[in-house]
Amino acid sequence: MSRVWSAQKKHSTWRRLWVALAETEQELGLEIDQAQIDEMRGAVDDIDFQKAAEYERDLRHDVMAHVHTFGDRCPAARKIIHLGATSCFVTDNTELIQLRESLQLTRGQLVAVIDRLGTFAERHRDLPCLGFTHLQSAQPTTVGKRATLWCHDLVLDLEEIEHRLQTLKFRGAKGTTGTQASFLQLFDGDHDKVESLDRRIAEKMEFGETYPVTGQTYSRKIDAQILQTLSGIAQSAHKMASDWRILAHRRELEEPFETKQIGSSAMAYKRNPMRSERICALARFAMSLTANAEQTMAVQWMERTLDDSANRRLSLPQSFLAIDAVLTLCRNVAEGFVVYPQVIGRHLQDELPFMATEEILMAGVRAGGDRQELHERIRVHSQEAARQIKEQGRSNDLIERLQSDAAFANVDLTSTLDAKRYIGRAPQQVDHFIGKVIEPIRQRYAEEIAGEGEDVRV
C-alpha cells in the first residue's frame, strides 16, 4: 500500500499517461515520431526528483515541474509532452489508478480476514458461551456463532469494495474544463477522433469506461464514496476489536501474546490486548477522514476549485494506509486467537440457572404443577439467589433452592444445566454461513487467501 501511494508510483504513472497520450495522438494522425514515444517510454521510471523539486521551487506548479524534468530526460520528445492536456489528465487519472490498486489490495486483505474468522467460527461452532445484550448476560450463543457476526459485517464491507471496483471508471482525456476543446482543436474539429482518444487512453490504462462527463476533475463524490466504504471496514473492525477487548477482560479470549512481550511497565502480570486497541485507534482515524472527502465534494465550485488538492493528498493515502494496517492486525489476531473454554464454561454456569428457569417452569407444569404457582416460586427463589450474589458475593444457588422446594420434586433440575440445550440453532447457523457465504468467497479469491500473513510488530 505504501508503494501504491509513493512518489515513484505517482510520477511514473504520470509519465505512463504522457506516453499513452502521445501514442494515441500519433495513432489518430498527429505528427508525433515513434522515436519520441520510444524515448519517453524508456524513461518512465527514471525520474530525477531533485531536479523536479528545483523546477517546482521556481514554477510553483508540480505538474509543469515534472513536464520540464521529463523533457530534460527526453529532449526529442520535449515539445509534444502533455500535448492538449491539462494537469488533471495526469493527476486525476493517476489517482484513479491508485484508488483501483488500493481497493484491490484492500479486498485481498479483507478476504483473508474473512477466511480466518470463518475457520475460527467453524472450529468453535458448538462451544456454548454467554450471550450479551445491552452488555448484560443474555441467552447463550456459541463462540463460533459470535465470530460469524464479526465476519458477516466484513462480508458486507467486501460487497461494497466489489461494487466500488466494478463501477470505478477513468477520467480520460477531457481537457481543461471537461469540454475537450483543446483536443477538438488538435484534431481539426473531428469529434470521432476526440472520442476515440478518450476511449483508447482508458483502454491502455486497463479501464473499460471513462466517466461520461467531468469538469476539470472527476467528481469528488467518487472519493467520498470510496472513503465511506473504507469507513465501513473501520466500523466493522472497531466493533469486532472492541468485542475482543471485552472478552479479554473476561479472560475468555485472548489475542496472540509474544513470549517476551510486556503488558505493562509497572504491572508485570498484565496481558493487554494491544493489537485490538491499535485496531480501534486506527479505525477511528480512518472513520474521521471520511468527513474530509464529504466536505471537499460539497465545496467543488463549478468545474473545480483547488482547495481539494492538499486535502486529498493526505486523506486518500492515509485512509487506505490506516485500513491496510487495521486489516493486517485483524488477520494476525484471527490467526492466533487463544480460547479458554473452562473460563467460558464457568461464566456460563454462573448465569445458566436463571436462563434455565423457563424450561424448569415448563417441566414443572408437565409434571403436574400449577403454572402460576410455579412461576411465583421461581420468581421468589431467583430474586433471593440474585440478592445473595450481588450483596454477599455468593455463588448462584438457585438450583439448590429449587431442589429443596417440594413443588419441583418431580423435575430433573440437573439436566436443565446442560448449556447446549439453550444455544438453539447456533451450530447449524455457523455451518450454513460457512457453506453459503464463506465458501463462495474462498473460491472466488483463492489466491489472496492463500498468501502468508505478515509478521506483525506492535
Image (cartoon, helix red, strand yellow):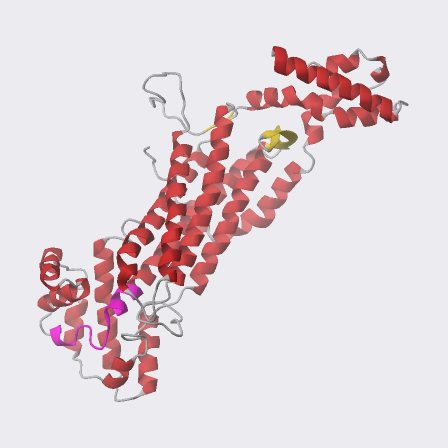
Task: Verify whether residue 78 appears in magenta.
Answer: yes
Q: Residue at x 65, y 22 (%)?
A: 351
Q: Quadrant of residue 284?
A: top left
In the rendered image, is residue 140 in sight?
yes
Looking at the picture, how far across and down is residue 225, in whole percent? 43, 58
Left or right position of 424 against 32 = right
Q: Residue at x 42, y 33 (%)?
A: 276
Q: Quadrant of residue 52?
A: bottom left
Looking at the picture, how far across and down is residue 404, in whole percent? 79, 11
Q: Quadrant of the C terminus?
A: top left
Pick whichever, 44 or 226, lies toward us: 226
Left or right position of 121 against 378 = left
Q: Quadrant of residue 91?
A: bottom left
Looking at the picture, how far across and down is residue 289, in whole percent? 37, 49
Task: Verify whether residue 353 appears in magenta.
Answer: no
Q: Residue at x 43, y 34 (%)?
A: 333
Q: Residue at x 62, y 23 (%)?
A: 348
Q: Number of labelled discs?
A: 0
Looking at the picture, how far across and down is residue 301, in whole percent? 34, 67
Q: State which region is magenta.
A: 77-93
Is the residue 116 above or below the residue 184 in the image? above
Is the residue 133 above or below the residue 48 in the image? above
In the rendered image, is residue 105 in sight?
no
Pick whichever, 40 or 215, lies toward us: 215
